[in-house]
Image (tube, grey):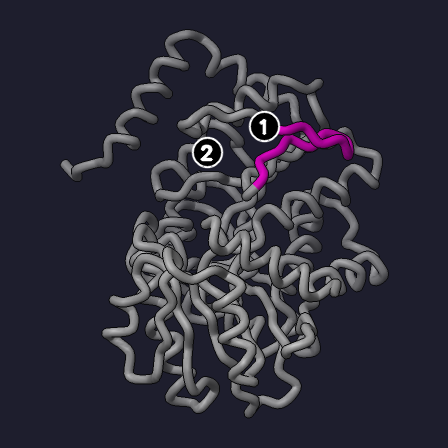
């Protein structure tokens, strides 16, 4: 038998306990009274997709509930937002508890909060039972919990889909698309792929905008109007922040290398322009660190970067394994302001990447904003 992490066993035991106590059947009955049930899964853009889908259905007159489990977890009911109270440990059963707070909606949209194959599957099978899963994309992130490669992440996401469910996939990579089709066919699930027009291929998150149309189609709803679609695409557009000392863009929230590269390409009017990455590296995200090492090495080989700056617990280890110049910053000795001054002084446009979850990165973002408004 495959060894399972203690948290997986705990989730299984808690699930059995809830069923025994009788709350499971009540939740299933509540779900069965909801006409349209959607789950949003994938790597990037889930919270954005959930909020947009909520707005679309609410604007069309549906009683609409949406659960967002991103950086700021919240329940949204008919355009009113309610904070989700959490203890030290985050449990999947908050999905049941939150839905119970509101009158039975016509539409329920859940952001899948699972970060492992088992927990992602459990959310779909037990807590949402979706007719449609919107799989926003498959990127190189959560490698430590979903698998060691992009294909492994795709496999984990595909295996979380309940049989008979329809999947709308925003993934644009042809090989990953083929892999998803094969995996979902084994699960008796169907899939449609999002097509992003050439004029919007470099817009980060364009697959989410066009995916909303396919989700609407899957539940027999009319697509977005051209005006609505263009408005959402405008919200996904990115541009340099101009500071007195130079240009910068904070792409740290992207986390994965595929999203970071989309942003880099979209920012550059001249494909040959050199940028300087500033990457924050977390020791508990070694898979992500390895992805950024491969990514920046490729950029250096292409001449797209001449130097990178790194900060965080894994910075020294990262620098030891690079074939291009790297400046290591010590967050215990240097302030975000000092790092930012050093990076801008090199005269290359600066792109911040890697991670946002640290006090250092929060202060860096605040410093960028303060300089922007000066």
Taking the spot 53% from the left edge, 27% from the top edge, the residue there is 95
Q: Quadrant of residue 247?
A: bottom right
* Above or below, 27 relative to 257: above
Tell whether position 80 is magenta. yes
Location of the N terminus by quadrant is top left
Tell whether position 52 is magenta. no
- Check disc 2: other Cα within 10 Å, few if <14, some if 14-19, many if 20+: many
Question: Label 1: which residue?
Answer: 84
* Above or below, 161 relative to 6: below
Extent of the magenta region: 72-83
Question: Label 2: which residue?
Answer: 123
* Above or below, 4 relative to 258: above
Taking the spot 58% from the left edge, 65% from the top edge, the residue there is 250
Badge 1 or badge 2: first in the primary sequence: 1
Kindly report which numbered mark, 1 or 2, lies closer to the viewer in this rendering: 1
**Pick the front one: 371 or 251:** 371
Location of the C terminus by quadrant is bottom right
Element under label 2? helix
Residue 181: image location, x then y, percent: 44, 59
Residue 142: image location, x then y, percent: 38, 52
* Above or below, 81 relative to 302: above
Q: Quadrant of residue 59?
A: top right
Taking the spot 45% from the left edge, 28% from the top edge, the residue there is 92
**Pick the front one: 60 or 330:** 330
Element under label 1? loop
Secondary structure, magenta segment, majority class: strand
């Amino acid at each position: 038998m495959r060894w399972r992490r203690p948290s997986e066993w705990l989730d299984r035991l808690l699930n059995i306990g809830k069923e025994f106590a009788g709350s499971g059947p009540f939740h299933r009955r509540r779900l069965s009274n909801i006409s349209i049930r959607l789950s949003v899964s994938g790597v990037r853009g889930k919270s954005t997709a959930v909020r947009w889908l909520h707005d679309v259905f609410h604007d069309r007159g549906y009683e609409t509930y949406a659960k967002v489990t991103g950086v700021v977890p919240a329940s949204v009911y008919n355009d009113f937002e309610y904070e989700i109270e959490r203890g030290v440990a985050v449990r999947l059963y908050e999905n049941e508890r939150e839905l119970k707070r509101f009158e039975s909606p016509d539409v329920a949209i859940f952001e899948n909060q699972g970060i492992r194959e088992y927990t992602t599957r459990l959310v779909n099978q037990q807590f949402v039972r979706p007719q449609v899963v919107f799989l926003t994309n498959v990127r190189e992130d959560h490698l430590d919990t979903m698998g060691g490669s992009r294909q492994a992440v795709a496999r984990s996401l595909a295996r979380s889909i309940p049989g008979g469910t329809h999947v709308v996939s925003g993934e644009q990579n042809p090989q990953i698309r083929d892999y998803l089709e094969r995996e979902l066919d084994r699960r008796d699930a169907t899939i449609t792929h999002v097509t992003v027009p050439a004029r919007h291929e470099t817009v980060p998150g364009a697959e989410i905008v066009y995916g909303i149309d396919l989700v609407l189609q899957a539940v027999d709803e009319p697509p977005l109007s051209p005006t609505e679609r263009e408005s959402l695409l405008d919200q996904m557009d990115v541009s340099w922040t101009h500071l007195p000392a130079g240009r910068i863009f904070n792409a740290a929230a992207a986390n994965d290398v595929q999203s970071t590269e989309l942003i880099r390409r979209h920012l550059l009017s001249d494909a040959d322009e050199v940028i300087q990455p500033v990457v924050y590296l977390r020791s508990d995200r070694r898979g992500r660190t390895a992805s950024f090492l491969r990514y920046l090495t490729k950029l250096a080989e292409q001449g797209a970067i001449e130097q990178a700056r790194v900060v965080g617990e894994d910075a020294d280890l990262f620098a030891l394994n690079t074939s291009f110049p790297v400046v290591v910053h010590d967050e215990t000795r240097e302030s975000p302001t000092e790092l930012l001054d050093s990076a801008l002084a090199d005269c290359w446009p600066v792109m911040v990447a890697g991670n946002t979850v640290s006090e250092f990165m929060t202060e860096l973002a605040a410093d960028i904003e303060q300089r922007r408004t000066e």
